[in-house]
Image: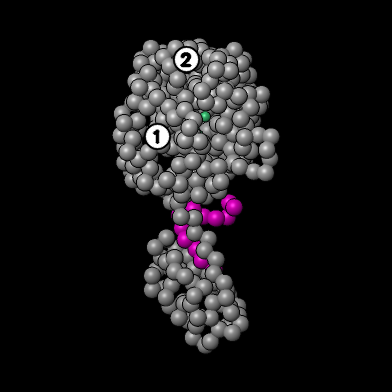
Amino acid sequence: MAAVSNGDASLIIVMSPTAAPGDLERLVERLRTSGAGVEVAGRAPRAVLVASGEPGAVPSLPWEAFPGVERALSLTTPFRFVSRDYHPERTIVRVGGVPLGPGGFTVIAGPCAVESREQLGAAAGAVKAAGAAILRGDAFKPRTSPYSFQGLGRAGLDLLAEVRERFGLPFVAEVVDPRDVELVAGYADLVRIGSRNMSNFTLLAEAGRQPRPVMLKRGFTATIEEWLDAAEYIYKEGNEQIVLCERGIRTFEPRTRNTLDISAVPLAQSLSHLPVVVDPSHASGHRSLVAPLTLAALAVGADGVMIDVHPEPESALVDGPQALTPVEFAALMERVRALAAVR
Ligand code: PEP
Ligand code: MN
């Protein structure tokens, strides 16, 4: 994996034993004309051609359709601006006044959804007192069933803004519709794109054209490269302030809501300069797993976590089983501080 160089393009073409005289030369000529460096190993007809160069220099053509080609393998990673080759230093994203990135461990916490002034206020007061730096709470919820609670919409954003003033906590909120990007970005300090929308390219581009930082959750069936390609959609529109969030992927294991891909954290950090946080709540779906997974995220080098906290999980309209109570969250923060001190 580490051998794949981000941004630069490379291509390996294996010629067929039945290639006609001249097939290899035509390919070499085609690639050199567009600016690629080309080397040939072996001898015609069974030769192997290796081309490399800047992305445009190795065009993505249907190489296996060219005469005499048996196999073509492109080693190009399409993401460029979010790659560490492009930007070797790791990025620190500022959310309100809060830095999120290398050297820190930023805790984001709050309810899955904004339900009422009382609920949000109680959650915000509790997470602030326990040491969280950023509040979470959604006004728009992407629900699997159209009959489930969809969020309070603009009224929810008003409550979030009110609570931000009251507690001095910047907040993150999800946007699910490209038409609402301006609305959500007008309120939130960090605009979130959820797992179900990671491949909504219109939404990604809209998020890239507004000035707030963006949190991009990994799609639950997305590879790490697809996730970074999605981040590239945002970056390429001009928004460089992106936080990646690993939230678990769907596997064959039914006992957890998702399977937390802990290896994705150091891997994404090595491929990309963007900060990577973990959502242990949506990854596991169970309150009892949130603390161990938070500590795992800290130990593995994540730049932060986002944790569901509800003042009364049993009455939560969304995701009650995975929400910590304020008391559980405060106890977890003690353990986070102890482990952070020796990280
Ligand atoms: C959430 O964080 O509330 C959420 C909907 O998560 P995900 O997009 O990861 O499912
Ligand atoms: Mn949720």
The relative height of residue 43 versus residue 160 in the rendered view (above or below) is: below
Magenta: main secondary structure: loop
Residue occupying image coordinates x 44% and y 65%: 60
| Spot occupied by residue 304 in the image (x, y as percentages of width and height) | 53, 29
Disc 2 secondary structure class: helix
Residue occupying image coordinates x 35% and y 22%: 155
Residue 175: which disc? 1
Q: What residue occupies the far bottom of the structure in this picture?
A: 21
Residue occupying image coordinates x 59% and y 41%: 249
Identity, as a three-letter code, of the amino acid under mark 2: Gln
Quadrant of res 170: top left
Other residues around mark 1 within 10 Å, as few (<14) / some (14–19) / many (≥20): many
* Cα–Cα gap, marks 2 and 1: 21 Å
Q: Is residue 213 left or right of residue 261?
A: left
Quarter the C terminus occupies: top right
Considering depth in this image, is 237 or 48 the residue closer to the camera? 237
Magenta segment boundaries in residue numbering? 1-12
Of pointers 2 and 1, the one earlier in the residue sequence: 2
Considering depth in this image, is 271 or 215 the residue closer to the camera? 215
Disc 1 secondary structure class: loop
Q: Which residue is mark 2?
A: 119
Q: Is residue 45 left or right of residue 77?
A: right
Identity, as a three-letter code, of the amino acid under mark 1: Val
- The answer to whether residue 338 shows anywhere in this view is no
